[in-house]
Amino acid sequence: MGASQIPAASTASNPSDNWVLISSTNPVATSLNVTGISGYKKLRIQWNTSSVQNLASFRLNADSGANYSYNGYKLVGVSTTPVIVASQYSSAPATTLVPTDQHSYFDLVIESADTANMKMTKLDAMNSTPHWITSSGYYRATAAVSQINITWSALFNDLVKVYGVLA
């Protein structure tokens, strides 16, 4: 698929990044494996659905090991008091890249995707309850990101878009 150019999003760490659309697909399934993403220094995964989706796991390079850590906050309903969503550190690493929660809007940026170094992440998400999640974390990697593996607890039937910034 040819890459389409889009403007830099406001959550990008560098507004001059030239984000290109790598893929746009509607999986109509409970899982999605995105490949063909090598050579991008940053990756962004987005969806915006009309219904809430229960995320079961989100992994890189099919790695189900305890190599992920994240820390985030959740605002629930009309409350303005942050509630910690999840906290995982090296003493208790996670087996998924982001908090497994309900998401109707999902925007995840992965930094250093083209190196064998640690990958830093930033997630903004929400659902129709409403609740908002902001989370950051990392993936202790030994290789560049070559695939993204998403699993939902029920059928996902909407567009998932993957963008990248070329190395």
Image: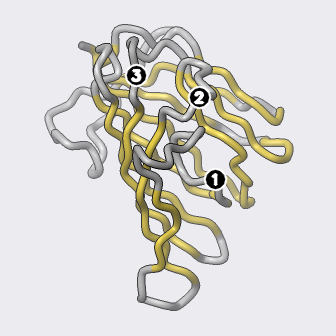
Q: Tell which circle, 1 or 2, labels the residue nearer the N-terminal end.
A: 2
Helix, strand, or loop for circle 2?
Answer: loop
Q: Position of residue 41 (x, y in %)?
A: 28, 20
Residue type at the position of mark 1: Thr
Measure how far apart labels 1 and 3 are at the Cα level. 20 Å
Q: Are marks 2 and 3 in contact (CB under 8 Å)?
A: no
Disc 2 crowd, CA 10 A, few/some/many (<14, 14-19, 20+): few
Front tag of 1 and 3:
3
Measure how far apart labels 1 and 2 are at the Cα level. 16 Å
> Which residue lies at the image location 42% right of the left edge and 88% below the top edge?
81
> Which residue lies at the image location 59% right of the left edge and 51% below the top edge?
48
Q: Which residue is mark 1?
A: 100
Figure quadrant of residue 31: top right
Quadrant where the image shows the N terminus = top right
In this rendering, position of residue 106 left or right of residue 156: left
Residue type at the position of mark 3: Ala
Q: Tell which circle, 2 or 3, labels the residue nearer the N-terminal end.
A: 2
Helix, strand, or loop for circle 1?
Answer: loop
Quadrant where the image shows the C terminus = top left
Disc 1 crowd, CA 10 A, few/some/many (<14, 14-19, 20+): some
Q: Position of residue 163 (x, y in %)?
A: 42, 28
Disc 3 crowd, CA 10 A, few/some/many (<14, 14-19, 20+): some
**Quick one: 134 or 9, which is closer to the camera?**
134
> Which residue lies at the image location 28% right of the left edge and 25% below the top edge?
112
Q: Which residue is mark 2?
A: 65
**Quick one: 156 or 75, which is closer to the camera?**
75
Figure quadrant of residue 82: bottom left
Q: Tell which circle, 1 or 3, labels the residue nearer the N-terminal end.
A: 1
Label number found at residue 141: 3
